[in-house]
Structures are given as C-alpha cells and as structure tokens.
Amino acid sequence: ACEAPLATLRAVVAAMARDMGHSLALPFPKGGRTRMLPAHVDALPGGDEQGTFYALDLGGTNLRALAVELGAKKSEVADVRASEVAVPKEAYCGECAADLFGFIAQHFADFVAAEKQAGRAVGKCVGFTFSYPTEQTGVASGRLIEWTKGFTCKGVVGEDVVALLKVELEKRGLGALRVSALVNDTVGVLARARYSSGSDKPAACGVILGTGTNACYVARAADITKESVPSRTGDMVINIEWGNFFDEVLPTLRADDWLDMDSTNFGEQRFEKMIGGMYLGELVQYILLEYAHTGIVFEGTATALRKAGAIPSKWAADMADDESLELNAAGSVLHALGMPTGGDMRERALARDAARGVIRRAGRLAAAGVTAVLQMAGGGRAAAVDGSVFEQNARFRTAMDEALEELLGAEAPECTLANDGSGIGAALL
C-alpha cells in the first residue's frame, strides 16, 4: 500500500474529483466527503494593493500575529513583522471559547502594543486565518463545523468564530479594529501567490501540506448548485476541505485504521491522517508496533510504541533520510523506544523503510489530490503550496513531483512555495 502505484493514484484522482462534484451539488453529508465550502471570496489580489495590514494565523500548533506592509511597486511586500507563540493545551482544549479566543486576542493585543511603541503605522483591519472546517456566511463571518488537528475547545463548534474573536478583542481595547476577512489557510496561500505573480502564470490552486492538509481553487459560482452564492465576478474560491476525503480506492494500511481509532475524531479526516505532518510519525509508530507484536523483531519496544507520540514526525523524517552505514538515526529512535543497543541492522532497516514508505505514500497521495483539484479548476500549470511538510521534507517533495509527472506528463504543474502564504494572504484579503 505504501507504494501507491500509478493505477491506484489514477483511481484516487477519479474518486476525489467525483466526490468534489457531488459536494458542489449537495450539502454535507448528502454530497461527498469533501466539504466544498464557498469562501465568499470572488476576486483575488492582483499585485496593486498598498498599505499596512494585520493578520492573525491560527493554523495548528502555533499562533502568529503579523503586520504586512505592501509597497508602492507592483506585487511588493515591503516588510513583514511577525510574533509567533505555541498554543497551550489549556487554550486549544479549553473548557469554553474564551479560553482559546482570549489567548488569541491577548497575543494580538501585545503585538499591536509593540508596533505602536516602535512608532510604526497602525493598521485598521485584520485578516483572520482560521484553518478548521468552517461554513462561511460572509467574507468575515463563519461557523465552525468541527475541530480537527487535535483541537477540542468547547463552546466553539456551531458558533461564528469572528464574533467570538471580536468579543475578546473588545475586552482588550481593540474593538475599533475591523476583522476584514475570515480566511482558510489555503485561500490565504492562493491569495499570496496571486499577489506575487499578478497575471503572470497565476496559481490555479492553493494547497497546505503541513500539520494538516487542505486545498482550494477558483470555481465558477454557477457550478455551486447546492446553494446560492453571490458573486460580483462570476467566480468563487472553494475551500475543499479535502482532508475529510475517503474512498475504498485509497491505499490504506492497518496502521491507518489503528491511528483513526485512537484519534479524537474517529472516522473523520482520513485523507489528512495519511498525509498530514501531525500523523506521519504516528503511522510509522503503528507499523513498528505491528512488527513488535510478532515477537520476532523490536523486542522490548511494544510498551513504548503504545504511547501517543512515541515517534514524532521529525524522527520519522530523520530515519527516512538516513544514508549512514550503521543507520544511526533509526538506531537512536529504537534506543529511545527501549532497545539498549538500538536494534540490529535488520531492525534498523525495517524502521527506516517504514518511514520511507509512509512519507513516499503521503507525497504521492498529495499529487493525486492536486491533480483532482486541477481537473475541477479546468487546468492550470501552477500550484501554490505552503506548509512545513512541503517546505522541509525533501523526500516528500520528490515523491510528490514524481507522481505529478506520472499522472500529467508534460502538463504537470509547477508546485511553488508560497512562503508564509497563510499569514500574508489573510492580510491581503
């Protein structure tokens, strides 16, 4: 299953495109597993925007506040200042909405205060990147459908997240600041890419390949038949929420089923759980646990392998990249799991190959997803991508590029890094 051969990828492309078509026609859950949520963005930046704009980016484990200065030259980002902080568990698993949104608002208030103290121009509006399945009711309003990526904060599902943020901003003296846009991170990535490129080879889709994964593209508003969506241009950006896609054609392992059963959202986000950086190490962990249960290899590791987070995704990437004669990275991981000598060479090779297989499959499935999105978008030769897995994992990128070429040949898109797209893109909108 980790090989994900071309025939399987073609079946995934067809199934995903079919699912997206169903979800444009019928609301969830009557349609497909993807959500196909209108982002209420009918026009993207063209490179002529100017001024100072704020952004808040809540995309996973970290929260960022940004000030973005757009220069006088076309497509010029003159300066970006950012403050980043880890989201504590008491916020993302809070007992009420104020636990999370109070934390967000306080970090932003501290950032704005520092900007004022430095004598910098103060923005009048802030774009809010909120990278969780949200049914948008307007460009700056939307209700959370469900939490993903380990978030469980109570009192938020079903609520307008912009309204929750405004309440906390007002408590901190920032009530006059206008929340100009509620943006999924994929939409921010696409906006960032369009601002930078203008009309020169515009990106056809925006993709996140980081802690989690998702994509968006520009559809014709008329193609959205499940609801009436106003559009001044005839276009509408669609937040696919492809992480929730699932079909029997996906090349799954027993490890995928075990990971899903132990997750906080059983049965949901199955595609994301095969690709997202949050899960790659955990998948390797379950594969090694399956080996350990045979009693033949990895003796003494079973207890450690049953603990959540025993193999972080960084460790999996290190093992996959290990070219040393002694496979030292795999040895270090196995030592940490309870093998005093770090295992023999056969065990180290098994661990390395498990990591390589999981990462290779993830990259190839990401390519299948991009191919399906380009079909929905009517083609395109460029895809804007952001996220730590795409940016930092060369093995993942290589697998993704190879699969795109297998699927599309000479028509394979150029996947370019839209660096900090989720943050800067929100400021642009």
Image (spheres, rainbow, N blue to C red):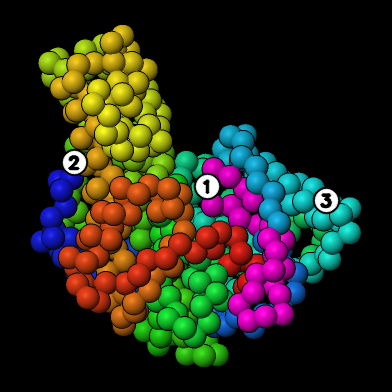
Residue 383 location, quadrant: bottom left
Q: Position of residue 415 (x, y in %)?
A: 37, 66
Mark in the foreground, 3 or 1: 3
Give the number of the disc on residue 424: none
Viewer-proximal residue among 112 and 172? 112
* Quarter residue 56 falls in: bottom right
Locate residue 222, reporting x and y percent: 40, 88
The tag earlier along the polypeptide, 1 or 2, is 1
Q: Residue at x 56, y 59 (%)?
A: 420
- Seen at 59% across and 52% down, the residue is 58
Check disc 2 and give the amino acid type.
Leu
Q: Nearer the viewer, residue 233 or 417?
A: 417
> Residue 244: within the magenta?
no
Q: Position of residue 29 (x, y in %)?
A: 34, 62
> Label 1, on which residue?
60
Q: Is residue 399 left or right of residue 207?
A: left
Q: Residues within 10 Å of mark 3 (few under 14, many from 20)?
A: few
Residue type highlighted by circle 3: Ala
Q: Which residue is mark 3?
A: 114
Image: 413 above or below 171: below
- Number of numbered discs overlaid on the protein picture: 3
The three-letter amino acid code for the residue at tag 1 is Gly
Q: Label 3, label 1: how many angstroms apart (C-alpha)?
A: 24 Å
Of the two numbered discs 3 and 1 on the same chain, state the one appearing first in sequence.
1
Q: Check the image and name the residue furthest to the top.
A: 340
Q: Position of residue 157 (x, y in %)?
A: 54, 52
